[in-house]
Each structure stands twice: as C-alpha cells, then as structure tokens.
Image: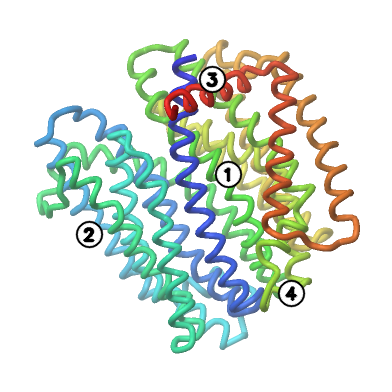
Amino acid sequence: MREENSLVKNTLVVGIGTFLSRISGFFREILISSSFGATWVTDAFLIAYTIPNLLRRLFAEGALSTSVVPVFSRYGEEKKSSQEFISASFTGFTLIVSLVCILGMVFSPLLVHLIAVGFRGEVEKISLTTDFTIIMFPFLLLISWSALLMGFLNTFRIFSWSAVAPIFFNLGAIFSIYFFKPFLGPYALAWGVILGGIGQFLFQIPPLYRAGFRLHWDWKFWKNKGFRQVIGLMLPVSFSLAVSQINTIVDRVIASTCQEGAVSALYFADRLMELPLGVFGVALSVAILPSLSQKFAGEEEEEWKNTLAQGMRWILFLMLPVAAFLVIFSTPLVKLVYERGAFDFIASSMTAQALIFYSLGLPFFSLNLLLTRAFYSRGNTKTPVKVSLIAVFSNVVLDLLLVRWMDFSGLALASSLAAFLNSFLLILCLSRVSESLEIKTLLPGKWMGKILAQTTAFIFFCHFLQGRLYSGGEGKGLLSFIGIIVLVSGFYFLLTILFQLEEGQTIVYLFRNWRNNAG
C-alpha cells in the first residue's frame, strides 16, 4: 500500500503540473485557431512544426530525458562527479544538436517537399512552410537543454518544475501571436515557438542552481563515462521513438491529400486527447520509471511485477472512463474549446469526428508509455523497437485502407488500432520474460470484470446526460461543462466504491491524509 501511495502521490505531482501546462497549451491553440482558423496557413505551420517537433521527441523530451535519469542516479551523493557529468552532457549535446539544427535549416526545402506531399505545385504554401521550418529549427536546441534539465531534476525527485515548465513555452507562443501578429502576420507563429523555447529552458535553471549545480562548458565531454553511457542508452531509445513517430508523419502526409483543414482537424483533436494522456499516462510513466529501475537493479522481481501491475491498473482505471467521456462529449467539448473566430462549424465538426476515433485508443496510448518504460527499466531496449516496427507497419496499412472509406477520420482510427496492437504485443512479450508477468497476473480476471462493468455503467450514465443536456445541439458555457465533469467524476467514484476497487480505497486514504495534514 505504501508503494502504491507513493506512486499515486508522485503521479499526482507530475499530473497537476502537466495539467496546468496543457491548459495553457489549450489557450495557445485557441488563439491559433481563432486567429488563423483551420486554413492552409495553419496547415503550413503544423507541417513545418512537425519536423523540429519530431526531432524534439527523438533527441530531447523522449530519449534524452529518459536516458539521463538512470545514468545520473548512479552518482548518488558524489557531487563532484555529478557536476562533471552535468557539464559534459550540456556541452556534448549542445554541439550535437547544434549541428543537427544547422543541417536542418540548410536542407529545409528538401524536408518540406518530402513531408508536405499535398502541397506540391502550390508555391505559396511551400514557401511559407519552408520559412516556418527554418525559423523553428533552433527550437530543437532550446528544448534539448530543457530536457537535460528535466532529467537532472527528476533524478533529484524534483518533478514539479519540469512539469510546469511548458507553461512558459505556451506563454511565449501566446505573447508572440497576440503582440507580433499585426507586424509579422503568420510568422508570429514560428517566432512564438522560439520565444517559448527560451522561456521553458530558463525556468528550469533556478532549481538546478539551488541543488548546488551549474551549467559549465567541458570541451573534453567525450571522456566523461556518464556522457558516453547516455549516448549508448539514447541510440536504441531514439530509434524506438523514431519508429513510433512515423505514425505522426504518415498521418500528416496522407492528411495533406485530404480536404482542406484535415491536417488541422487531426492536430487539434490530438491536442485534446493529449491532455488526459499527459495528465495521467505520461505522469504515471514518469513517476514509475525510477521505482521500476531501482527494483530491477535490486533484483526485487516480485516487487517489480507488483509495481508494474499497479501502474497498469491505474492506467485502465483512469483512462477507460476518460476515453468514454471524450467520445460521448466530443462535439460539445470541441465547440467549447475551439469554435470561435476563424474556427467555424465545419472545422469544429471535423475536429470532433477525429477526436472520437483518437479517444478510442487513449487507454492503449497510455499503456504503451508505461510498458515501454517497463522494458527500459530492465535494460531491454530491443523489444520495444521490434514491437514499434510491427505497429507502425500496421498503422500505415490501416491508414491507406481506412482513409478510402472514412477520409481523414480513418487516420485517427488507424492510430488507435495500431496502439492496441502495440499494447497487446508488449504484454505478450512480457509474459515470455516470466510466467509471473502474464496478463492474468498483471490484470486479474476479477479486477478486469469489475472495471469493465463499472465503465459500462459510466458510459450509460454519460450517454443519458449528454442526451438530456445537448439534445438541441446548443452549446454550454465553461462553468456548465466543468460542472458536467465534476458530476460524472463523482458518479465514477461512487461506482468505484460500489464495486469495491482498491483504487477507490487508495483515493480515500490519500484524501483523508491530505485533509489531516491541512488541518
């Protein structure tokens, strides 16, 4: 129970920070959608942003931050060695990523022609997309610095600063669009990314300094053993992430051949889906990685299994109702968040349709984050790569099949189906590691029966509520929608108590503990 409480507390810390960051991100998306709508200008920006953003996930917030934590943890209380590792990592990755940025800026026209297939022959679109790409490529260096700091801080169990830091990225983007659009036009979008990246990096420096460390240059960085170990860990992790990110590129390449606004509709729907994914899925996987790594290093196989099982149960406990809610309330949610200014009824309908099919895969997107880190904690980086290759191939095939009948919505459904396949294969591979890691032990049949019955009751309740409140098609205000969220959350918690799930007991315990401490 103590281990589970610690996991939930750490997840809560990261989740709250992530939630605040995502909320600020929604304000940024609202400003973008209301200022430029679901038009070719927004499509050009999103296509251009795909390139540095993909590399961000490969080099920075994905592989880099994940690889730094286990290596930095080995230094323990050795402050001198820790400082040397920080300096070597900062210098080494600055040089490596700077080279990538320079090459990316030089070859931006070629990259745009490869990715924006649907823009070929449209000179104005290609030109603007290329300009955006050149401006935004240095963002990769800024976000790599931020990822390094995040890895250092997470090693110290300082999760909140890194979770909140993206708020400053969003504030920079909002500031640029709001104040620079009259002078720069659509280019304010690209410069906002750079301004936001600077803010996100600078925000994380104070807690590192308070911990007694500095960012120094070390031109002999390659001699540092820890730096070389991080590089060794990053390579397979980056490859695995690269394989999974192909899904995003394929979706946008095919979407660029669909009706105007398809790229934007998929993007805005994905942003809505990523809010709960970040608050719960990402937060839990970040919080659980140090615990899994420690238990495997200490040869505590049973404790490792129990921790993973707890993580999987919490993922399903949280994500099944969230996915159901997003499917049922997709249209009113999209209207509330996006439908204003240049973002009209058609754009809203397209986005809501995409959100429905993305939401179906939400539990599996979350499980994949957790299961992949479970393999990494065991030093196994090959299995996630192999599984990702299979899932990506399946995603491409499904994209090509479903887009013919469902247009751009088929791309969202294909992503969800590929995520399910990925989860299934990862769990199957875990069962081959040990009989104690079979699905029936990780997710017992009795517990699965309860959670599925509980989710079914929740779906009926949400469907009834949606029919009563939105039968006329009219929208509701923010406070009304928040009230709906509170109501359905309360109903789900009552179901948890009724079905006597352990997760409900943990929530009650933590609430009582918080209330006693507050009192």
Which one is closest to the eye, mark 1 or mark 3? Answer: 3
Which one is closest to the eye, mark 3 or mark 4? Answer: 3
Q: Amino acid at mark 1?
A: Leu
* Residue located at (78% from left, 65% from top): 349
Local SS, label 3: helix
Disc 2 crowd, CA 10 A, few/some/many (<14, 14-19, 20+): few
Q: Which mark is residue 277?
A: 1
Point out the tag, 1 or 3, that comes first from the N-terminus. Answer: 1
Contact flag, marks 1 and 2 (Cβ < 8 Å): no
Disc 1 from disc 2: Cα separation: 33 Å
Which residue, given by chain and number where applicable, does mark 2 sit on?
95
Viewed as shown, does residue 469 lie left or right of 73?
right
Disc 3 from disc 4: Cα separation: 46 Å
Query: Hey, which quadrant is residue 474 in on the image?
Result: bottom right
Q: Amino acid at mark 4?
A: Asp
Q: Which mark is residue 509?
A: 3
Which residue, given by chain and number where applicable, does mark 4 sit on?
344
| Count of numbered marks | 4
The answer to whether residue 400 of the structure is visible from this angle is no
